[in-house]
Amino acid sequence: MTLTQEEAHRLFEYKDGALFWKERPRSDFKTDSAFKQWNDRYSLKQAGSCVGKYVNVSINKIRHQVHRIIFLMQHGYISEVVDHIDGNRQNNKIENLRAATHTQNLQNAKLPKHNSSGCKNVVWHKQRKKWAVRLVLNKKSKSYGLYDDLELAELVAQEARNLNFGQFARDF
């Protein structure tokens, strides 16, 4: 079952980046008394818990990511990917969420932990003993040159990201 905007508004209230229960779906409970007891106890309490990297909530025994529900409530549809602009997966304020493609979401990714240069899109070229600037565009690697100086390579990478990734460019 796909969650609709109407159902999301019936179940939740959005406030400052969080969802609060209005009520749970009747189908989540075996008895009417359990349904009433839950709604009496948890109505208007914050919904969701952090499982893995995202805040999730269970509806009809199906786990949903809270940021996707918030986006649905505000925009009326669910995008292929809902991107956290600031990269903080816990910051679900509507002004921090935007529709994106998978590629755009990757462009907005943080610096990978395995990165050895400390700069996005800058790698050490062993054979030439220089810093290489590379971006992936349309699933193909594109080179932006080799540099003796890491700072210069970082500036070139930053310019290349801004030019090619636009609003999805992230430098850190």
Image: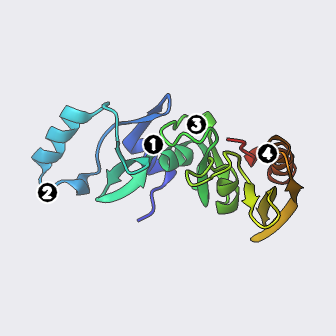
Tag 3: residue type? Answer: Ile
Q: Quadrant of the C terminus?
A: top right
Residue 69, how many percent across, how many down? 48, 48
Q: Earlier in the sequence, mark 2 or mark 3?
A: 2
**Element under disc 4:** helix
Front residue of this view, candidates 129 and 119: 129
Q: Which mark is residue 30?
A: 2
Question: Number of labelled discs?
Answer: 4
Amino acid carrying mark 2 in the image: Lys
Label 1 sits on residue? 9
Label 3, on which residue?
94
What is the x, y in percent for residue 61? 28, 59
- Give, as a three-letter code, the residue at label 1: His
Q: Residue at x 36, y 56 (%)?
A: 63
Q: Residue at x 58, y 36 (%)?
A: 94
**Could you say which disc has been placed on residue 71 in the image?**
none
* Mark sitting on residue 150: 4
Q: Dot 3, how many residues are within 10 Å of its Cα: few (below 14), some (14-19), or many (20+)?
A: some
Which of pointers 4 and 1 lies earlier in the amino acid sequence?
1
Dot 3 or dot 4: first in sequence order is 3
Q: Is residue 5 left or right of residue 138?
A: left
Q: Nearer the viewer, residue 6 or 143?
A: 143
Foreground tag (1 vs 3): 3
Alpha carbon distance from label 1 to label 2: 23 Å
